[in-house]
C-alpha cells in the first residue's frame, strides 16, 4: 500500500474549479499534500488521510473532517470555523492562528498540537 497521495494539488484545484458542488474526498489518502491557501469550504474530508499535509491558510469553513488523520498537519492560519473535527487525529498538528470558532472537537486527539 503506497503512502503517496491519491491526488495532486493540481488535480484538486481542477476538481474545485470544475464543480459547483461540494468537494467530496471522503477516505482519500492525501498524505503530505500541499493544499495551502485553497478554498475547501464545506468539503467532505471525513476519514481522509491528511497526515503531514500543508493546509496553512486554507479555508475549511464548515468542512467535514470527522475521523480524519491530521497528524503533524500544518493548519496554521486555516479557517476551521464550524468545521466538524469529531474524532479527528490532530496529534502534533500546527494550529497557530487557526480559527477554531464553533468547530466540533469532540473526541479529537490533540496531543502535542501547537496552538
Image (tube, helix red, strand yellow):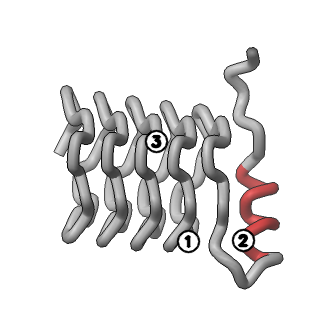
Residue 94 locus on image (x, y percent): 30, 41
Residue at which label 1 appears: 39
- State how far apart marks 2 and 3 are (Cα): 20 Å
Residue 97 locus on image (x, y percent): 23, 58
Q: Residue at x 36, y 41 (%)?
A: 88
User: Quarter-wise, where is residue 17 in the image?
Assistant: bottom right
Quadrant for the N terminus in the image: top right
Q: Earlier in the sequence, mark 3 or mark 1?
A: 1
User: Quarter-wise, where is residue 114 in the image?
Assistant: top left
Q: Earlier in the sequence, mark 2 or mark 3?
A: 2
Q: Could you say which disc has been placed on residue 68 in the image?
A: 3
Of residues 16 and 84, the one nearer the viewer is 84
Q: Residue at x 58, y 34 (%)?
A: 32
Local SS, label 1: loop
| CB contact under 8 Å: marks 1 and 2 | yes
**25 relative to 108 in the view: left or right:** right
Residue sitting at the far top: 1
Crowding around mark 3 (Cα neighbors within 10 Å: few <14, some 14 to 19, many 20+) is: many
Residue at which label 2 appears: 16
| CB contact under 8 Å: marks 3 and 1 | no
**27 relative to 84 in the view: left or right:** right
Amino acid at each position: 500500500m503506497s503512502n503517496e497521495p491519491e491526488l495532486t494539488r493540481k488535480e484538486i484545484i481542477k476538481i474545485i474549479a470544475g464543480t459547483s458542488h461540494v468537494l467530496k474526498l471522503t477516505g482519500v489518502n492525501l498524505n503530505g499534500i500541499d493544499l495551502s491557501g485553497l478554498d475547501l469550504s464545506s468539503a467532505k474530508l471525513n476519514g481522509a488521510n491528511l497526515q503531514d499535509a500543508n493546509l496553512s491558510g486554507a479555508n475549511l469553513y464548515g468542512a467535514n473532517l470527522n475521523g480524519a488523520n491530521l497528524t503533524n498537519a500544518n493548519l496554521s492560519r486555516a479557517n476551521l470555523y464550524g468545521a466538524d473535527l469529531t474524532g479527528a487525529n490532530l496529534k502534533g498538528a500546527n494550529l497557530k492562528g487557526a480559527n477554531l470558532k464553533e468547530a466540533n472537537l469532540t473526541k479529537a486527539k490533540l496531543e502535542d498540537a501547537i496552538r
